Amino acid sequence: MAEKTVVVTGASSGIGLAAARHLAEHGYTVFGTVRKRAAAEQFGGQAALRPLLMDVTDHDSIRRAAAEVEAHLSATGGRMAGLVNNAGVAVSGPLGYVPLKAVRLQFEVNVIGLLAVTQAFLPLMQQADQAGRIINISSISARVTTPFMGPYSASKFALEAFSDALRVELMPFGIKVIIIQPGPIATPIWNKGADRALAMYRRTPYQPVIKSLLKYFAKQGRTGLPAAVIAQAILSALQTPRPKTRYLITAGKPAILISQLLPDVWRDRLLYKRSHLERVRPE
């Protein structure tokens, strides 16, 4: 049987690292992308788990990474079984004040980077005897947009649109495109940049609620589902004969689904109260 190879982007921590390890333990040769060689130490020396230096915002590094995987497939006679687009960043803040530079980075990583990686590795999947699968890691934020998460939610809405189009476009090749929508996961992404965010918005009308917002994010990092839950979902999406197009994975799944049925004005009022925005006063 031909060796099955999977590329997992953003594998230095969180969901990406958990997925890379889990897939390697279940018979896949996994190339986990990291931006710095030192991050590969997280892999723990697993023979089936190989670091792949790549930055999703650097198109030259993407091309080099694709060439390295192609050389491996040629040498081993293996096939590209899957691409897991996990790399991402989360930019938060009130849209009236969030720096445009930060929003551009949000889309460069979560949207443009995802498409660039997909385009680079797609030829390897089209050449495989058995069509591989593309798994895009989205978020519940692509279902329900909350205050201060506009940049992140917008990038995930864009990811979903790309995935919906790509899923149909790749049907002639037998390549399936699958979206995984995690709820809060215990990963470092929730704690990154908290102090910077607090300082950035201190002089805005939203200052009274920023600190409580950051506390909420920190809580998500402590109490969210373990990344291993998403790793198992990724494995299932790769192996099940007839995968779903979307997997919503969150402890609050009923509440998310119900909230989508509410009229916009009701949902807005609910989010307004939960975000304590009544404490905001115009300058």
Image (spheres, helix red, strand yellow):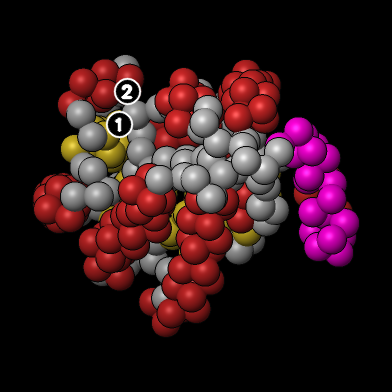
Residue type, mark 1 in image: Leu
Magenta segment includes 277: yes
Q: Are marks 1 and 2 in contact (CB under 8 Å)?
A: yes
Coordinates of residue 2 in the picture (x, y in percent):
30, 52
The tally of labels here is 2
Give the alpha-carbon distance from disc 1 to disc 2, as whole Å: 7 Å
**Range of the magenta residues?**
259-280
Quadrant where the image shows the C terminus = top right
Neighbours of disc 1 within 10 Å: few (<14), some (14-19), many (20+)? many
Residue that numbered label 2 is attached to: 43
Coordinates of residue 103 in the picture (x, y in percent):
41, 50
Neighbours of disc 2 within 10 Å: few (<14), some (14-19), many (20+)? many
Point out the frontmost of discs 1 and 2: 2
Between discs 1 and 2, the one toward the N terminus: 2
- Secondary structure beneath disc 1? strand
Residue that numbered label 1 is attached to: 49
Question: Is residue 44 shown above or below 143?
Answer: above
Question: Is residue 78 shown above or below 25?
Answer: below
Q: What residue do we see at 60% from left, 63% from top?
A: 245
- Secondary structure beneath disc 2? helix
Residue 232 seen anywhere in this rendered image of the structure: no
Question: Is residue 130 shown above or below 76?
Answer: below
